[in-house]
């Protein structure tokens, strides 16, 4: 038998302790060709080897001088806000991107901004108006301190629309941005609604977003015709319920409807004058809100045209109110009560039939 030196083979054995542990030898066929082993010291530290399939394909590494300068937007490792990283070639290694800073368009607000509404912006989905903090103001009327317009929208009652059976009226009260302020609901019995029709006496509860009654309206049974000057229409406004803050009283007139808006001491603060014809024919019907002497118009109450279908087949009405922003909140609430009185007197139907007439006859 020949020795190894006799056949030209002289093996070189690794130094003691340099053999890989058992089980860590690469499978057959995965050894790099000779000359492609990295020089000593260039192996990545343990745990930093890229995952399989993340090495760029040959020829896809950027040429020297084409790497973005450090610190510039879009540089590797420092993407611009909203940048999702550079395009990833097939089989390439993706570069991590990130979204824009919190609070930018399309992303959530910054921490601490949840639940805060920007001034002048309507609430999402027509939500409730946030209540401002005002001193020396009746509870629930603080909503009225910072506004000069109100929208009153009556809800459609399908039973009443299809059968003519009178149901209790319900309304939403909103500001000019569509935020809900109050919900108003008529409190009457079935017999009163269907026997007395638009002349019926009623109590109306006006609730805030917590379902607390903040304003109470009371309309007594009375006449509307000028033939009975001693028994004309009125409505009493209380806030909080039980504390009278104002009244609206009809004045005797033959042609145009007239009302006075009075405070709790029965002093005339404002006047309301309507048109001779209150028919709503493809347009708004306006009632002017005047100063106490009747010389200066300070606002108006408008019965808004709500469309041919609603006007013809329902008694669902929409109203707009405008008044000076610095008007006493108690008088603003009293003007709100005037809207409901005007609605019942001139625009409420009985059995889906119009009851409007010319003048106050």
Image: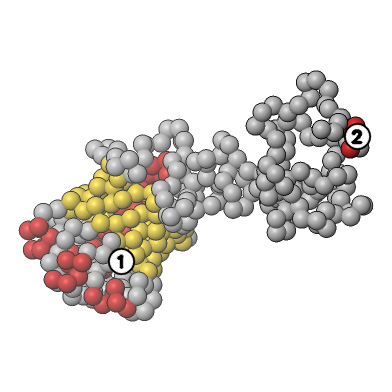
Does residue 67 show up? yes
Give the percent coordinates (x, y) of residue 224.
19, 64
| Residue 309 position by quadrant | bottom left
| Residue 190 position by quadrant | bottom left
Badge count: 2
Which mark, by number, is residue 317? 1
Where is the C terminus found, in terms of image quarters? bottom left
> Residue at point 91% right, 37% down?
8
> Residue at point 35% right, 58% down?
152
Q: Dot 1 lies on which element?
A: loop
Q: Nearer the viewer, residue 132 or 329?
A: 132
Q: Dot 2 lies on which element?
A: helix
Give the percent coordinates (x, y) of residue 293.
42, 56
Instruction: Please give left or right for residue 81 compared with residue 142 in the image.
Output: right
Which mark, by number, is residue 6? 2
Residue 316, relative to residue 212: is it above or below? below
Residue 16, relative to residue 91: is it above or below? above
């Amino acid at each position: 038998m020949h020795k190894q030196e006799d056949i030209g083979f002289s093996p070189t054995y690794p130094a003691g302790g340099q053999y890989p542990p058992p089980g860590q030898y690469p499978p057959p066929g995965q050894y790099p060709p000779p000359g492609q082993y990295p020089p000593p010291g260039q192996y990545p530290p343990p745990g930093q080897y890229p995952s399989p399939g993340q090495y760029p394909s040959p020829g896809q590494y950027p040429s020297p001088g084409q790497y973005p300068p450090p610190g510039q937007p879009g540089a590797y490792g420092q993407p611009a806000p909203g940048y999702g990283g550079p395009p990833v070639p097939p089989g390439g290694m993706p570069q991590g991107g990130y979204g824009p800073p919190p609070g930018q368009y399309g992303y959530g607000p910054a921490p601490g901004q949840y639940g805060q509404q920007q001034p002048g912006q309507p609430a999402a989905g027509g939500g409730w108006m946030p209540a401002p903090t005002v001193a020396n103001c009746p509870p629930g009327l603080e909503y009225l301190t910072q506004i000069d317009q109100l929208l009153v929208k009556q809800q459609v009652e399908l039973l009443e629309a299809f059968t003519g059976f009178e149901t209790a009226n319900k309304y939403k009260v909103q500001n000019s941005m569509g935020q809900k302020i109050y919900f108003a609901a008529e409190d009457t019995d079935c017999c009163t609604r269907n026997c007395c029709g638009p002349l019926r006496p009623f109590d109306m509860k006006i609730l805030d977003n917590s379902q607390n009654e903040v304003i109470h309206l009371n309309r007594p049974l009375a006449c509307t015709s000028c033939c009975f000057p001693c028994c004309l229409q009125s409505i009493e406004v209380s806030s909080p319920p039980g504390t009278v803050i104002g009244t609206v009283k009809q004045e005797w007139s033959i042609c145009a409807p007239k009302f006075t808006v009075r405070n709790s001491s029965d002093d005339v603060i404002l006047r309301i004058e309507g048109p001779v014809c209150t028919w709503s024919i493809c347009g708004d019907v306006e009632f002017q809100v005047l100063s106490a002497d009747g010389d200066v118009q300070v606002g108006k109450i408008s019965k808004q045209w709500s469309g041919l279908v609603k006007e013809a087949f329902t008694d669902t009405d929409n109203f707009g109110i405008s008044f000076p922003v610095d008007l006493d909140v108690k008088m603003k609430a009293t003007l709100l009560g005037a809207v409901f009185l005007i609605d019942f007197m001139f625009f409420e139907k009985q059995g889906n039939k119009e009851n409007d007439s010319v003048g106050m006859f």
